[in-house]
Every structure is written in structure tokens, then in C-alpha cells.
Amino acid sequence: MSGAERPPVGVLIVDDDALVRAALSMILGGAPDIRVVGEATDGAEVPAAVAAYAPDVVLMDIRMPRVDGLTATEALRAGPEPPEVLVLTTFDADEQVLRALRAGAGGFLLKDTPPAEIVAAVRRVAAGEATLSPAVTRKLITHVTAPAATAGPDPRRERALRLLGGLTPREREVAVALGQGRTNAEISAELFMSVPTVKAYVSRLLARLELNNRVQVALLVHDAGLV
């Protein structure tokens, strides 16, 4: 199937602010390959909305009155065949970023992100690629490079090392490259693989590590202290 024949990416917008929903609908509606299939005003409405509209991507706010976007993301991504989630918010607190990404969100953008970049992010997340705003990336790097608060055992690091220790040497190389933020094309050039082979390795890593996306692989690599 050619690119022109592919159905548009269906997006569900979840935000309690009607003006924000309208603005996002206008931004995304201008892209020929994206279609806003529905809206929800709270995280509590997400399961029913996803069942009704079958979106490819959920554009999720964090702060909502009843069920926040992080809780909704965790519940959604824990279900069978969930849509991708792109978190879009005015807040970029470290704990929110990490919780969203560990829950399986494919990206985390701030609401001051330019419209063209929001559209591009939706496309990337729909294609299974991670996307983070520069401010969020800086926070993530700061978190994973910060020294441990205590000298005692680190359960998260021990778990990460155990999981990564079960990989083949080549799988481990690809995992580390993901932890360094490399794209498939960059991994292809660096490790002398074809891009389809890189994609196959990434899919294999997600299956073996029981993770949802490459961001979670990157976090696991950072938890293990390998980059």
C-alpha cells in the first residue's frame, strides 16, 4: 500500500479545556494525513472514548479534574492492543515525565510546542517512534545522569541489568544505541545493519523485554548505567 493510500492517523484529544481542544482540532485538522476522530474532557472518559473511536493516537493532557492523564495512560497502555499516547501539557516536572514514559507513552510535549511540531510528533508516535520536546529531553538527561541518592542497592538498576543481561550481544548493542537516542538510520550506519534489520531488532527487544516502545528501552538502558 502506498503512502497516499494509507488511512489518516486517527487522533483522540483528551483535555478538560474546550479552547485547547478546539485549537488542537484546528492544528491537526489541517494535516491531510491526520483525522481527529473524537474528544474527551477527562481521563475517566478515555476507556469509553477509545472503544468508541478506535484512535491510533491519544493526545493526552495531564491535569484533569477526576482522572489525571498519567493514571489514564497507565490504565490504557496496560490493556490489550492500546493506541499510542502522546502527552501534551503545560507541566514538565521530572516525576511526571518519567511516570508517563514508564507507563508507555510514546512522547511528551509541552503545550508551547509549535503547531507544525505537534503535527510531526503525532505522525512519529503513530509510526512507533518516540518524541520528546527539547525541555523534556533535558530533564530526562538530567535525571538519568544524576548520581544515586544513596550508596545502597538500587532495585531499579539491578532489575535493568538482569533484563539486559538476557540479551544477545547484538541486541544489547541496539539497546544501548536506543539509550543514546539514536534513530533507526543512525543505528543502521553505526552498527552496519540495514534499516529493516534495525527495525526487526527493535521489535525483538520490545518483545523480549516486555516493553511498549523504544523510550522504555532507553530508560531501561539508563537505569542499568550503560550510557
Image: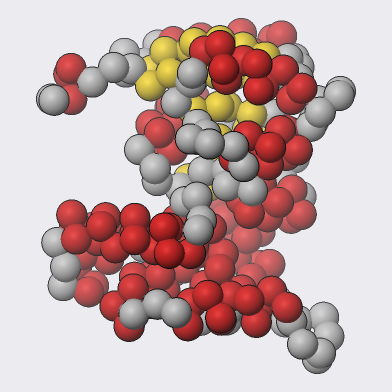
Determine whether 71 is above or below 36 in the image: below
Give the vertical position of 138 relative to 1 (above or below): below
Which residue is found at the position 63% from the left and 76% from the top? 159
In front: 102, or 63?
102
Quadrant position of the N terminus in the picture: top left
**Residue drawn 51% across the image and 56% down it:** 211
Is residue 190 visible in the rendered image? The answer is yes
Q: Note whether residue 178 is visible.
A: no
**In the image, what residue occupies the spot 43% across and 18% down?**
10
Horizontal and vertical percent for residue 143? 68, 67
Query: On the picture, is 13 further left or further right than 218?
Result: right
Q: Which colour scheme is used?
A: secondary structure
Q: Position of residue 72 (x, y in %)?
A: 71, 33
Q: Give the image location of residue 158, x and y in percent.
A: 65, 82
Instruction: Check the image and name the residue furthest to the bottom.
Output: 151
Image-quadrant location for residue 86: top right
Q: Residue at x 74, y 55 (%)?
A: 94
Q: Which residue lies furthest to the right in this view?
A: 65
Number of dots carrying numbers: 0
209 in relation to 86, above or below: below
Q: Is 70 placed left or right of 200 in the picture?
A: right
The image position of residue 66, as x and y in percent, is 86, 24
